Amino acid sequence: MPLQRPLDERHRIFIHRCFPHSRQKPTGYRHRVLVGVGGNVGDVQRRLERLWVYLRRTAQIYPIQNGVIVRNPPFGYTQQADFDNTVMEIATSLNPHRLLRRLLRIEKYFGRKRSFANAPRTLDLDMIFFDNQTMNKADLTLPHPGYKERLSVLIPMRSLGPNAQKRRRRYENLDL
């Protein structure tokens, strides 16, 4: 049973047996990436646990740490269940576009079906930061637009360890 604490009338924090969690720092991976993770269909917290284990077994991706889970209301299409969200810091040897394709395949593996914008979903994986790169392509924008306004990213990001805090400050100081 996860511990939970209300932040306000619309947001709750969950401390789960795997969230937050950190692992030994990797060697041999060139890039550090912060991935936003969430969903609102089915047992999302269990799915997040399964995702953590799945990523540990995935080639070219090394999950380093994750943050607390935040339950928050949906935005955009609001006639759906609340979302459980967190962030995961990973190391990878993939470039941003290859990692994006890998994340999309992982979403599909976990049952994601894309029916319309902001639809309910089993799993949503968004790259928030990729090293300290900035990019604005049709299929990928880095850092993720709007992350500074989303408590579903900011709260879990602030729960990460001190090295991630330094990277977060570096990301936030990017000249966008």
Image (spheres, helix red, strand yellow):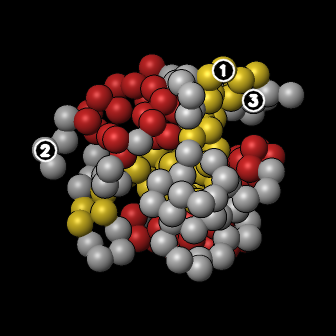
Residue assigned mark 2 = 175
Residue assigned mark 3 = 16
Identify residue type, mark 3.
His
Q: Earlier in the sequence, mark 2 or mark 1?
A: 1
Q: Secondary structure at mark 3?
A: loop
Q: Nearer the viewer, residue 67 or 27?
A: 67
Q: Is residue 58 visible?
A: no
Residue sitting at x 57%, y 41%: 72
Residue sitting at x 24%, y 62%: 135
Q: Measuring from the top left, give residue 141's x and y in whole percent.
A: 31, 63
Mark 2 nearby-residue class (10 Å; few <14, some 14–19, many ≥20): few
Residue assigned mark 1 = 5
Foreground tag (2 vs 1): 1
Mark 1 nearby-residue class (10 Å; few <14, some 14–19, many ≥20): few
> In the displayed structure, would residue 108 be above or below residue 175?
below
Q: Is residue 101 left or right of residue 165?
A: right
